[in-house]
Image: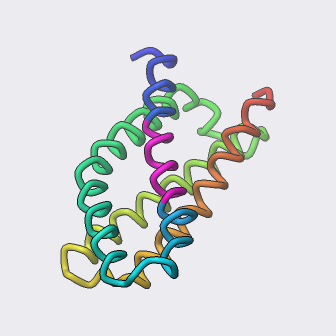
Amino acid sequence: MSYSVLITLHLFAAFIFVGTVFFEVLILEGIRKHVARDAMREVESAIGKRARQIMPWTLLVLYSAGIGMAWHYRSILAHPFDSSFGTLLTIKIVLALSVLGHFITAMVLGSKGLLKTRYVQRIHISVFTHMVGIVLLAKAMLYLKW
């Protein structure tokens, strides 16, 4: 698959994933104190149900395209600290793997009935922070020569 197709797929999947995380962290958390607890639970339940339908596919596209793009830079990744680009790409990949770990943790906890609101909030804030880092790294990488 061509690099331009991979980056387009990766960007669209990233928009969906990052947009969802931003919405949940910045919008939903901001309205929590203004909405009745039962209503908030219904909203969270409905959003969670929808997210469980689309996020696995979104992440499949996001990570598959990311792997394809990383393959394009395999010679740089073989010696990641020899260039600024390689270092930033390596950090971006580590952050992306951590996000995947968060997602898997949430799915496991959810399947066991252990995914409580406080865990969801902590996971969302952590993923949000990771995503800000990934976006900033991706932007910084555009300006570097490798």
In percent of the image, x 64 and y 42: which residue is there?
A: 89
Give residue 48's quadrant in the image. bottom left
Q: Which residues are magenta?
A: 13-23
* Quarter of the rendering occupied by the N terminus: top left
Q: Reply above or below: 15 against 122.
A: above
Report x, y in % for residue 12: 46, 33
Q: Is residue 70 left or right of residue 50?
A: right
In percent of the image, x 73 and y 46: which residue is there?
A: 81
In percent of the image, x 32 and y 60: which residue is there?
A: 47
Report x, y in % for residue 44: 33, 69
Q: Is residue 6 left or right of residue 137?
A: left
Give residue 83's quadrant in the image. top right
Report x, y in % for residue 17: 45, 48
* Quarter of the rendering occupied by the C terminus: top right
Q: Reply above or below: 119 against 43.
A: below
Inspect the magenta stretch and tell me whether residue 21 lies in it. yes
Report x, y in % for residue 100: 42, 58
- What count of labels does the image hold? 0
Inspect the magenta stretch and tell me whether residue 7 lies in it. no
By secondary structure, the bulk of the magenta-drawn segment is best described as helix
